[in-house]
Amino acid sequence: MLIIGAKGFAKEVLEVVYQCDDCADLAFYDDVNADIPDVLFEQFPVLKTIEAARLYFKNTDKRFTIGIGNPILRKKLCDTFSALGGIFTSTISIKAEIGHFGNTIGQGANIMTGTIITNDVTINSGVLINLNCTIGHDSIIGDFAELSPGVHVSGNCTIGAYSNIGTNATILPKVVLGTNVIVGAGSVVTKDVPDNCLVVGVPAVIKRQLTPIEF
C-alpha cells in the first residue's frame, strides 16, 4: 500500500496498517517536504515523484490511502493518484468498534483507533474519522468529511461532504450539516447548518460564510 503523505497524520495511518499486519511493500509518498528522508523508520521507502508512484502502482501494489487531513486536499489527492492507476483503499483500525448491522464504508476511509460506530451508519468515500470518535445509528457521513479526535455524532445525523468537525465537538441528534461546513473545536451543534458555513460555540452559531468549493 502507498500512504500519501509522510508526516503527521500519515504516521498514524501507518500504525493502523501495522495493526492490520499489512506492511508488506508499504511505501510513503511526499513530493512537497524537502526534509523527508528517503526511508522512514529505517524500513519504508518514500517516493518523491509522480512517475515513481505510477511505477509503484504498476509493479508493486495498486492500493493507496491518504495520510493527510483537509477534505479538499484529500479529494484532489484521491483524483490525482486514481488517475495514475491507484485504487483508493480504506484503512480501518482493528481497535475501532464497528457495529455488525446495516453499516457501509466507502472507498478510502481512514477509521482510527478508538472509534465507535453503531449500526445503520453510512461512511462515504474518503472520510477521515480520527481517534476516539463516536457515530450514532442511522447517521450519514458525506464524502471526504473529516472528524477530528473526540468528535461525537449522535443518531440520525447527516454530515455533508467536505465538512470538517473540530476536536471534541458534538453534533446532537437529527442535526443536518450542509456541504463544506466547519465546526469549531468543542462546539455543540443543536440545529441544522446550511452549506458553506463556519459555526462555533455552545450552542454553535454561524460566525461567517465560506467560499463554495470548486474543483
Image: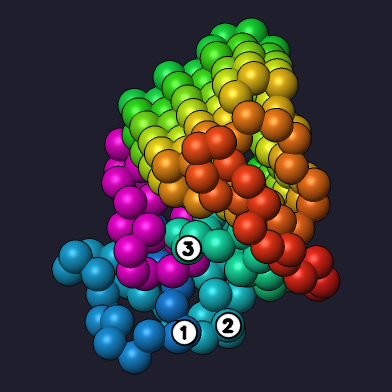
Q: Amino acid at mark 2?
A: Ile
Q: Which mark is residue 31?
A: 1
- Nearer to us in this view, 54 or 66: 66
Q: Which numbered mark, 3 or 1, is in the foreground of this view?
A: 3
Q: CA distance from mark 2 to mark 1?
A: 8 Å
Circle 3 SS class: loop
- Nearer to us in this view, 197 or 133: 197
- For marks 3 and 1, the one nearer the N-term is 1
**CB contact under 8 Å: marks 2 and 1:** yes
Image point 81% across, 72% down: which residue? 215
Q: Amino acid at mark 3?
A: Ile
Residue 14 visible: no
Residue identified by numbered label 2: 50
Q: Amino acid at mark 1?
A: Asp
Say few, some or many: other residues with alpha carbon within 10 Å of mark 2 (under 14 / 14 to 19 / 20 or more): some
Residue 141 visible: yes
Percent position (x, y) of residue 147? 52, 43
Query: On the rendered structure, is 112 left or right of 63?
Result: left
Percent position (x, y) of residue 32? 45, 85
